[in-house]
Amino acid sequence: MNLELKNKNALVCGSTQGIGKATALLLAEEGANVTLLARNEKKLQSVLKELTNKGNQNHNYLIADFSKPNELKQVLEKTELQFHILVNNTGGPAGGPIFNAKIEEFENAFTQHLKCNHILVQAVVPFMKTKSYGRIINVISTSVKQPLDGLGVSNAIRGAVANWSKTLANELGEFGINVNNVLPGATYTERLNEIIKNKAGKTGLSVEEVSKNMMNASPAKRFAKPEEVANAIVFLASKKASFINGINVPVDGGRTKSL
């Protein structure tokens, strides 16, 4: 299937590892011009070298820390914001019961996930409107459908992002701009390794036992690969997804119990 992404410009957040990196690589494979966005310049430079330019694309990167929204604003103000595609993606909050969470944990997660997503959307949508084409894909979590044990702050903030996204989809659809959410299940990334180690430390189980239990929670009996989540993101970024708007797409091997 030709996703018709040649000459499309994509801004991919959190693109130095995991799902973000896999998405950036696949968008480049499909012909898009990719701009990476993350806080670690050395890692950004490394991923930039991995992006194919077989279609004579122009790839680039931006440096910003999502814990500092004003810094993100300043970076965007200095950038030519001609993006057809925005992939909002950043690392999740630390795990733990919601009752024990500090107020600062909610504030920090809200800043990194919702506030920075909003800053990015406000920056890129004007150009999208001039082209009558825009794809905003938010990488969230299956917790927006089914809260996950031990991820209290994440459950709360992810739900807020999902509702923000749905509201945006309603407001921007008439301009040819689609806003959708991809909900990864347990995906083999550094983030998952942290969650597994945390659970092992709290339960007394081994890392191997925790991993097996998590895999068995999915009918697929395994973790997703970052590339499998990226496939869904890149499809939603394409012209082929022109009438898909305002939805949550779980990529979890069937783990989520709800429809």
Image (cartoon, rainbow, N blue to C red):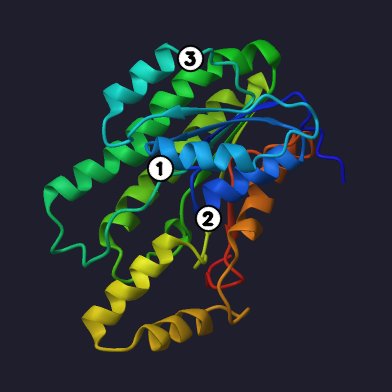
Question: Which element carries disc 3, helix, strand or loop?
Answer: loop
Question: Does 169 appear above or below 228?
Answer: above
Where residue 57 sits: x, y (%)?
A: 73, 26
Q: Nearer the viewer, residue 228 or 110?
A: 228
Question: Which element carries disc 1, helix, strand or loop?
Answer: helix
Q: Earlier in the sequence, mark 3 or mark 1?
A: 3
Q: Earlier in the sequence, mark 2 or mark 1?
A: 1
Tell me the tag on residue 183: 2
Can residue 226 be spotted in the picture?
A: yes
Q: Quadrant of residue 99?
A: bottom left
Residue located at (40% from left, 61% from top) = 191
Determine whether, in the image, residue 238 is placed left or right of residue 143: right
Where residue 88 sits: x, y (%)?
A: 49, 38
Can residue 243 be spotted in the picture?
A: no
How packed mark 2 is, by other alpha carbons closer than 10 Å (few <14, some 14-19, many 20 or more), is many
Identity, as a three-letter code, of the amino acid under mark 3? Thr
Q: Earlier in the sequence, mark 3 or mark 2?
A: 3
Determine whether, in the image, residue 142 is placed left or right of residue 84: left
Residue located at (35% from left, 25% from top) = 72
How packed mark 1 is, by other alpha carbons closer than 10 Å (few <14, some 14-19, many 20 or more), is many
Q: Nearer the viewer, residue 59 or 95?
A: 59
- The mark closer to the camera, 3 or 1, is 3
Find disc 3 in the rendering and name its residue: 79
Tell me the tag on residue 161: 1
Identity, as a three-letter code, of the amino acid under mark 2? Leu
Image quarter (top left, top right, bottom left or bottom right) of the C terminus: bottom right
Identity, as a three-letter code, of the amino acid under mark 1? Val
Question: Does 202 appear above or below 118?
Answer: below
Where residue 136 sits: x, y (%)?
A: 57, 33
Distance (Cα) linking label 2 and label 1:
12 Å
Q: Quadrant of residue 110?
A: top left
- Circles 3 and 2: CB atoms closer than 8 Å: no
